[in-house]
Amino acid sequence: MPPLTAAMMQSIRKLAAEKKPAFGEGESHIPVEHYFSHEQWNAEIAALFRKLPLIVAHSSELLPGQVMAHDGYGLPLLLSRDKDDTLRCFLNVCRHRGMRLVDAAAPLSKASVVCPYHGWTYKLDGELRHMPHAEAFSPCPTGERNLTALPCAERFGLIWVVPDPQGMIDLDAYLDAYLGALNTEMPWYEIDQLVTFRTIEAEYPANWKLIVDAFLESYHIRVLHRDTISPFFSDGITASERIGPHIYSLVARREALETFAEPESHETLRELVTPSQVIFPNTITIFHPDYLSLVSLYPVGSERLRWVHRMLIPRDKATPDWAPHWEKTFNLIEQGVFQKEDIHAAVEIQKGLRSGANRTLTIGRLEEGLTWFYEQVCLHTQGLAK
Ligand code: FES
Ligand SMILES: [Fe+2]
């Protein structure tokens, strides 16, 4: 286990010493169009969901010799991991007449990918290996009809893709810069040691950013989560930090602050605080006391999102005798807290955005994370991000 980083310790000490909410600099305002305008949505697709490294899956979901489709970003993606464990991402589109190659979002074990239309066959590294009646086609340069590759990398147990067929960049180098200090924070959570217990996917009539907003402040915990998680948390005591475009938060747990002791391990840290991160733009990690919620938000339309929540658990507890515990915990958080409270709030906000009641949404000094996130979205969509 890597040691606790200095930044993390500093935040925890600050929370414990002050035991009161840390107010941000000032009130700010987000125009309501930000959550329903088609122009805004198109700008976000172009600037965020085609240009930035995005998380598409947990590493444990794709074993050597498997392929799976991924459509969340509005481009048909095909992920493959060959027998030598090399991970790749392609457009899930045949190079003959464009047929979709793999239909399943669940992993499939395959030695090769055979197009269901005329049988062109591709190796898992994307190379075209066989064309029935090859003599019917003109010769072409080697590699010309291989699958179209996209930048793809694996880091911290997560699979990252830049969904831009024109963007052949060195994604590892890009992630070094893009994640910045998160590169030293993330290993501590050993996400690569976890396995997926359950994934739930659903669409909701709300802008994707409204859900991100719900994970950027703890001001709502006392009221919205009054009957669920509120008793476990202090009221608004959160340390948040910007790491490039990403936001890293530690939300203080109630009892732990009363009997503060410096955390020595992963477990003791999570008794004190719930760490959570918004990995810009659309991934949220929540480190519950004994498992990780990995939430991905997909922008289906300007007023429609796709929610994908993975529950990741320690490998040594992925056993049948632990299953009832995980089942109960997952249902509590997914149905009881996320669906009935956080997602419900986003859907209810969306209903009133066009009503004319508000020209802007008001962001108070305990919700500064929303201002930071909004700034980043604007910097990227206006082409001003560094
Ligand atoms: S479209 Fe794929 S083989 Fe014809
Ligand atoms: Fe919440």
Image: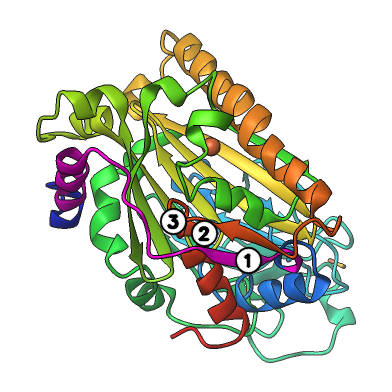
Question: Would you call the spot at circle 1 few (<14 residues within 10 Å), some (14-19), or many (20 or more)?
Answer: some
- Start and end of the magenta stretch? 9-33
Q: Amino acid at mark 1?
A: Ile
- Element marked by disc 2: helix
| Separation of marks 3 and 2 at Cα, in angstroms | 10 Å
Is 345 placed above or below 155 here?
A: above
Q: Position of residue 253 (x, y in %)?
A: 31, 30
Q: Residue at x 52, y 53 (%)?
A: 283
Magenta run includes residue 216:
no
Q: Which residue is mark 1?
A: 30
Q: Of 378 and 333, which appears nearest the observer?
A: 378
Q: Quadrant of the C terminus?
A: bottom left
Q: Residue at x 27, y 32 (%)?
A: 270
Q: Which residue is mark 2?
A: 370
Q: Amino acid at mark 2?
A: Leu
Magenta run includes residue 25:
yes
Left-right relation of 129 to 222: right
Residue 66 in view here:
no
Q: Position of residue 98 (x, y in %)?
A: 85, 70
Left-right relation of 196 to 255: right
- Element marked by disc 3: loop
Question: Would you call the spot at circle 2 few (<14 residues within 10 Å), some (14-19), or many (20 or more)?
Answer: many
Pick whichever of labels 3 and 2 is earlier in the sequence: 3
Pick whichever of labels 2 and 1 is earlier in the sequence: 1
Which of the two marks, 2 or 1, is nearer to us in this view?
Answer: 1
Residue 141 in view here:
yes
Are the residues at dot 2 and dot 1 in contact (C-beta closer than 8 Å)?
yes
Q: Which mark is residue 38?
A: none
Q: Of 386 and 350, which appears nearest the observer?
A: 350
Question: Would you call the spot at circle 3 few (<14 residues within 10 Å), some (14-19), or many (20 or more)?
Answer: some
Are the residues at dot 3 and dot 1 in contact (C-beta closer than 8 Å)?
no
Is 159 placed above or below 21 here?
A: below
